[in-house]
């Protein structure tokens, strides 16, 4: 824990307002970057061209996609529930941004004479805060499918509910090993606890379980069963178009960044560099972004490599393989921590 935390450090209200604006701005800028990176990389993986027409080297393709969606006419089925149909995408966006605010991009720094933490919020129950907003995000999927008045959307929502609940349990258990080792629930405290060794080494099993559960939580291949086009047309967002579909699309990619950021924070040392290197404070966000990019690249690589599972395989793997392994990892870590202290 930093010295500033021990002396009761707090930020002025205007700093918190500015940080909120910066969080939205960074999130809005990072999602198009991930979109173009995914399309370019998938083109390379699959021996074909990626986007190369819109803008130099196709770099403006994400902006063209976003403009196309935002300028489409809003439409909803006559059987839908109007209010919930409009609120569901908003829930997905808000929960994704709230979780993104947890990611620490650096330690507390002095900027223009004011001490500023390079994170949105450093709550004392960081992982619980993350899991809570993950649980609320479930309502964005569930309400979106149910309020559409479509059987395909509703089936996709039910799949999403079962999938999120199943893999969230394993994801939470995977974090227990880190919490036992660091003896803190603060994400910045967890980063400081990795000064000697990143937790990806002693908690490699927990890191692997957390990442696999993250793939399922974000509905990414090979766990994208909630929107399986061959079976459900488009899943829970089948009836959504225009800006509302763009909201779901944005939330999905922002959640990929959230999982990448949390993995970086709890397993890859956050802003810390290996070999005892201590760069200036302004380098910290660049280090975090570089590590997040590597994890996001893994998301894209897996999408290009593995085929989609059947739904029974998805649930069986979550409950019969991932959950016991996560429980065993937490148990072994607890025994080791007690024995060595």
Image (cartoon, rainbow, N blue to C red):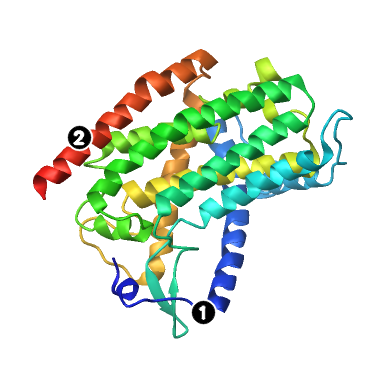
Query: Which element carries disc 1, helix, strand or loop?
Result: loop
Disc number for residue 332: 2
* Image position, residue 68 (x, y; %): 79, 43
Label 2 environment density (alpha carbons within 10 Å; few <14, some 14–19, many ≥20): few
Left or right, 183 with respect to 77, comes to left
CA gap, disc 1 and disc 2: 43 Å
* Image position, residue 3 (x, y; %): 28, 74
Determine whether 310 is above or below 77 in the image: above
> Which residue is depicted at the point 26% across and 40% down?
203
Left or right, 261 with respect to 139, comes to left
* Proximity of marks 1 and 2: CB atoms separated by less than 8 Å: no
- Residue 174 appears in which quarter of the rendering? top left
Determine whether 211 is above or below 47 in the image: below
Left or right, 196 with respect to 227, comes to left
* Image position, residue 156 (x, y; %): 65, 24
**Residue found at the very far left of the displayed protein:** 340
**Residue found at the very far bottom of the displayed protein:** 113
Observer able to see residue 257: no
> Looking at this view, is 227 or 33 the one in front?
227
* Residue at numbered disc 1: 12
């Amino acid at each position: 824990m930093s010295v500033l935390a021990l002396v009761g450090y707090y930020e002025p209200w205007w700093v918190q307002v500015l940080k909120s604006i910066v969080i939205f701005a960074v999130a809005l800028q990072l999602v198009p970057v991930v979109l173009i990176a995914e399309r370019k990389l998938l083109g390379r993986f699959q021996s074909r061209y990626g986007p190369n027409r819109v803008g130099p080297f196709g770099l403006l393709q994400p902006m063209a996609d976003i403009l196309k969606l935002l300028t489409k006419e809003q439409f909803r089925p006559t059987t839908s529930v109007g209010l919930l149909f409009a609120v569901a995408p908003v829930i997905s966006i808000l929960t994704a941004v709230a979780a993104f605010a947890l990611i620490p991009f650096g330690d507390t720094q002095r900027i223009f004479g004011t001490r500023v933490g390079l994170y949105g919020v450093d709550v004392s129950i960081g992982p619980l805060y993350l899991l809570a907003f993950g649980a609320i995000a479930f309502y964005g999927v569930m309400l979106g499918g149910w309020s559409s008045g479509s059987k395909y959307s509703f089936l996709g929502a039910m799949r999403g509910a079962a999938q999120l609940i199943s893999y969230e349990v394993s994801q939470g258990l995977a974090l227990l090993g880190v919490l036992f080792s660091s003896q803190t629930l603060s994400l910045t405290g967890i980063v400081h606890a990795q000064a000697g060794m990143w937790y990806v080494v002693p908690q490699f099993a927990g890191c692997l379980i957390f990442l696999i559960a993250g793939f399922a939580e974000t509905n990414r291949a090979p766990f994208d069963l909630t929107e399986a086009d061959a079976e459900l047309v488009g899943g829970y967002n089948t009836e959504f178009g225009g800006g509302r579909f763009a909201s779901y699309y944005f939330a999905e990619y922002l959640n990929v960044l959230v999982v990448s950021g949390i993995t970086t924070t709890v397993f890859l040392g956050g802003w810390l560099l290996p070999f005892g290197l201590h760069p200036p404070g302004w380098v910290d966000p660049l280090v975090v972004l570089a590590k997040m990019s590597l994890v996001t690249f893994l998301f894209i690589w897996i999408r290009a490599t593995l085929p989609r599972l059947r739904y029974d395989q998805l649930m069986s793997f979550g409950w019969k393989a991932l959950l016991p392994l996560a429980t065993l990892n937490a148990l072994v870590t607890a025994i080791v921590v007690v024995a060595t202290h």
